[in-house]
Amino acid sequence: MQLSQKNIDDIIEVVRLAGSKEILPVFRNLLPEQISKKSKQNPRDLVTIADHAAEKFIQTEIGKILPQAHLVGEESVAENPKLLDLIGTSDVCV
């Protein structure tokens, strides 16, 4: 499926909103308990509440724009690596 210019513009707006609503309010303001290690293999690979909130926001909003799309995000893949199998096998994958 080819995305329309409106779809692309809407997705860009969703990403901008995720930044302003979910990331900027806590930028450089996180408490230690709001930051965790993503994996045991790499102790420098961290994830924050803002990362999870932004990904959830993006998935929800893009799901409204492209309900048929499979959404694959970094934090979701860290929890479920099999999500990567969707890339290249589904009609629409974001």
Image (cartoon, helix red, strand yellow):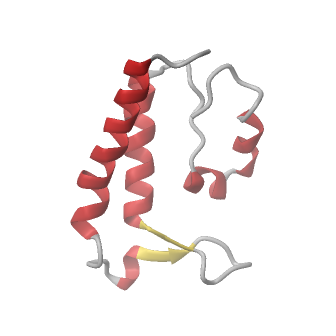
**Residue at image x 37%, y 44%?**
15
Where is the N terminus found, in terms of image quarters?
A: top right
State left or right for residue 92 relative to residue 61: right
Q: Furthest residue to the front?
A: 5
37 up-or-down from 69: above or below: below
Q: How many marks?
A: 0
**Residue at image x 64%, y 56%?**
79
Where is the C terminus found, in terms of image quarters?
A: top right
Foreground pick, 67 / 80: 67
Residue 64 picture quarter? top left
37 up-or-down from 53: above or below: below
52 up-or-down from 17: above or below: below
Residue 78 picture quarter? bottom right
Q: What x and y, as percent, mark residue 63?
A: 45, 27
Q: What x and y, as percent, mark residue 54?
A: 39, 52
**Residue at image x 29%, y 78%?**
28
**Residue at image x 56%, y 47%?**
73
Q: What x and y, as percent, mark residue 27?
A: 29, 71
Q: What x and y, as percent, mark residue 59?
A: 45, 38
84 up-or-down from 27: above or below: above
State left or right for residue 27 relative to residue 67: left
